[in-house]
Structures are given as C-alpha cells and as structure tokens.
Image (cartoon, rainbow, N blue to C red):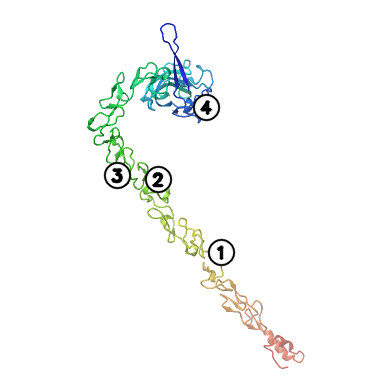
Amino acid sequence: MYAVVLLVCCSWVALLCPSVQAYENLAIHQLAWQSSTALSHTGADRAVDGMYTNLEWRAGHCAASEPFHTTAEWRVDLGRVLSIHEVSIQYSTDNQVWDKNNGYTSFFLGFSVYISNTTNKEDGVLCFRDTNYTRATIPNPVNITCPYHGRYVIYYNNRTHPPYPEGYSDYTNTDLCEVEVYGCPTPGRYGENCSLLCPENCNCDVIDNTCVQCVSGYRGHLCYEECDGHTYGVECNQSCGKCSGGVQCDHVTGSCPNGCDAGMYGDRCDLVNCTGHTYGLKCNQSCGKCSGGVQCDYVTGSCPNGCDAGMYGYKCDLECAGHTYGLKCNQSCGNCSGGVQCDHVTGSCPNGCDAGMYGDRCDFECAGHTYGLECSQSCGNCSGGVQCDHVTGRCPNGCDAGIYGDTCDLVCGSYTYGVECKELCGNCSNGEPCHHVDGSCLYGCDVGVYGKTCDEACQSGRYGISCAKACGQNCQGCNRFNGVCEFGCHPGWTGTFCEKRSKYVFRYFLSYKQFSTQNPCRFCIIAYPKYFIVNI
C-alpha cells in the first residue's frame, strides 16, 4: 500500500519531534475517467496504476488526452467519501529534463484540482488553481495539500478565454503519468495512522480534527444540530418535498414520515402525479403513444401495456422504421415506390408501389397477365399461357409459337414462324407473309410449290400456283414453275408445251409408203408404235 510520511514539528524550540502520520494512496487502481483519450494504451486508468518509470506519454505509463483540445479533464473515483490530505501529480516529461525548455510545461500551466462528492467539479470545492507558475517554476511532481472530504478528485485545465499569460500553450492535454491521493481509507478518521475518530456527525480535518463539514442531516459549528425548517441533507441545503400535513421530512434522507400531500409521490414526495399524458419533473415531458391511450409512468414515461400500432421504444415515442409497421413493428413492408418507409401504422405506401406490386400495402404481386407500375401493362404471349414476371414482364418459359421479344409481344417477321421464330417460310402466293404461328399461307402457295407451309416442290407432272396444274400430256416432264416441257416431248409432238404434232413424222410416213419395199418399216413400228401399227 502506498503511503506518505509527514514530519510534524511539535515545539517552538529548535527540536523536531518524530511524530509520524501515515496516509494511504486512495487512488491506486480506482476507476478513472478523462474527457478524451489519445491512444488505446493512454487511458485514464494509466494515471492510477502505480507505474510511472517511463514518462514518455506514448509509453503506456501515462494517461493522455487527444491533442488540440481547448479543455482537458481527468478524475478518479475513490469509491466513497473519504478524508483527503494531499494530492500528488506526476506530469509527462517525454523523458527530457524538466525545465523551461521542456515543451510539456506550457500545457500544464493554469491547471486546477477539485474535490467533489459528484462527477461535476462545480458541485465540489476548489482545492488548488495555478495562477503563478511559469514554464521555469512549475514543479514536477506537483504536491498539493487538500484537507477535504470527497469521493472524486478532479484535474481540470482549459484554454477557452484568450489571451493567455506568457508561456501558456494554445491547447491543453492531460498527460498525467500518475496521480496519487493520500488520506485516510476509512471515513470519519484522522490522526496518526488514521486511527482516531472524528467527532460525531463531523467530517473532520485529517490532521487537527476540526470539523470541515457536517455529515448529511446536521449543521452547526460542532455538527450537533439536525436540519429543520423543511431542509435535509449535506449542510441542510436541500428542501423537503410535499410531506403530508406539512411535517418536517427526515433530516438525513428527506423522506416523508406520513406520506405525501395529494398529487405528489416518491420517497421524498417531490414528484408530481402527472396527468394529461405527461411525465417527469414538473410534468413537462409528453408521453409517447401508449396502447389504448393510457397514461404513461409518471417518472420514466414508460407505457404499462406496450405501444400503439406503429410505435416502439421504452416510451413508445419512436415510429416503426426499417420497413416495418403495426403492433410491435412486427409486420414487414418493403415494396413502396422508391424504397421509402411505409406508413408506420397502416403499412400503406405514400407514393404508390414499386413496379410489379399492388394493394394498399403493396404486398401483392401483379397477376391476371399484368406487370409493371400499378400493374398497368399487359403480359405478352408467354408459352403455355403462364403469368409473366410481375416486374419485368418477361416470360419464364419463353414465348408462344410465332412470338418473340423480351416480353413476348412481337410477331415473327414476314418469312419466319414457329417457336422463337426459328422456322423459315417464303413461298406464299404473291410473296405474302406466312402465318407467324404455323407457317401456313393464307392465299395459297407460290408457283412450283405446295403443302401446308408451301415448302414442297411440285411432284412430277404438276406445276404452277400450289402445283394446281398438270403438265401437258405430251411432255416428257415439265418445269414446275411455268409448265414448259424442258425435258422434251413424246414422239410426234413439239412446242413449248408439246402441244403441236410433229411434221417430221408425217413426212416419214409418206416416205415409208413410197419406199416400203426398199426400207421396211420395222424401225418406225419400234419407235412409234402408237401411230404406225400396219400390216407389211
């Protein structure tokens, strides 16, 4: 345990009486706080860890706040109100000589030390404020006698009211390598080894036993008088509440012995029974949306039966967010146009629905072969008649035969048909387009072809539109487009369509009669059996 030893002179003669008083370091390993922290290993606790062999602020032995701040505050919580004698502060030196040339001196000039029973320095007493030190005279460590009682020791410095005295920096930091608070570890003690008891009801000076402050509920020079006149607490500086019958409250706690006056409540009868959906001190805060419109808790504002639809939070003062709505915000929305939040109560969308959705809460997908904004667009011809995508209009399984496009709303071109318009056509009469679904020709086939899709060439012996005409009977085979006998005529016939008898045959016949005895007609019979069957 850390301690400081004080030598006290006990005589006016030049003799020293070795009267020894030992005080413990009350701050060691206690909870500490500072207004900001420069690095993770320069937290407020580093100033009460008992380690300060390395005075470079980044070394991990010092508490250091962020640079370039105009105020710096550090405090330690002693755990309870104790008798304090002395505060010792070891500043960072950056391990350099501590003199006017050390840059750190300018950051510490003008500092103050407070002793308080709360975390607010203004609630306590000012133990010390530097108004005289210069960069050349500020000591390190600084030892300050503070014979006060308190729970919090607070270090404070600021640069908020320029101009500053010569040598002061423009900004201030904590940079405290160790803060030691010496005093008695047990309340109500003083003297050697803190072994003596202070007078009753008195927080006494740790050295000479004089009453520095009365304990809560007492006053007077010797702290024998109880608070009265409707006061209580430390130095009787707090006012009683509205006790029933106007009686004095408890001088220590402020509680009312017989309860509260009408309209008041609380241990000290200092809280008003709020009405009109208000709560808090002076009933100046409004309740949230409590379920059923009931009054919220007078103190906390909480709702006894939960929140109205569309509200959440401890006090039911927050509207549903994150695309939720309704009771306990447990219903989801999320298809509002532009992704905006739906109405926190009803779930309705303020600006309509996203594409592909409809309904008061935009929770239904387009159906009935519709899609898009407000389901105002009609699906195309999806294969099998299924619903298209409710947002894009695309068909999940492709298009019906004869249709194409992203939304299956385009008819196959003039010379294609069928599924995905992959089939080709083009032999319809007069160049007409075929039917986009089955490829059939509405007005029949062009010349030279026939069949349902006009994709078959005329069979032998046929020609013309839809192969409706027969080749001439004397043709060896005609052209399927125009009927021309392009492979020749049967014997005895001639002409484009073999429609004329051949003159050569009759001349040969006459020659046969004329020269039958010299040239038997066996060849004619073989060649033209139809026309020259005669007896020789």
Q: Residues within 10 Å of mark 1 (few under 14, many from 20)?
A: few
Q: Which residue is mark 3?
A: 294
Q: CA distance from mark 2 to mark 3?
A: 23 Å
**Looking at numbered disc 2 in the image, what kind of residue is underneath it?**
Ala
Q: What SS does tag 2 mark?
A: loop
**Looking at numbered disc 1 in the image, what kind of residue is underneath it?**
Lys
Q: CA distance from mark 4 to mark 2?
A: 44 Å
Between 528 and 191, which is closer to the camera in this rendering? 191
Image position, residue 45 (x, y; %): 47, 28
Q: Which residue is mark 2?
A: 321
Q: Is residue 396 above or below residue 184?
A: below
Judge depth for marks 3 and 1 and give the one in front.
Answer: 3
Q: Please identify the quarter of the rendering in which residue 491 is found.
A: bottom right
Between 358 and 186, which is closer to the camera in this rendering? 186
Q: What SS does tag 4 mark?
A: loop
Judge depth for marks 1 and 2 and give the one in front.
Answer: 2
- The image quadrant where one finds the C terminus is bottom right
Q: Residues within 10 Å of mark 4 (few under 14, many from 20)?
A: many
Q: Would you say the residues marked 2 and 3 are in contact, meaning their CB atoms lie under 8 Å apart?
A: no
* Residue positioned 76% across, 92% down in the render: 517
Q: Residues within 10 Å of mark 3 (few under 14, many from 20)?
A: some
Between 506 and 263, which is closer to the camera in this rendering? 263
Q: CA distance from mark 4 to mark 1?
A: 78 Å
Between 287 and 105, which is closer to the camera in this rendering? 287
**Looking at numbered disc 3 in the image, what kind of residue is underneath it?**
Val
Q: CA distance from mark 3 to mark 1?
A: 71 Å
Q: CA distance from mark 3 to mark 4?
A: 55 Å
Q: Which residue is mark 1?
A: 422
Image position, residue 130 (x, y; %): 42, 18
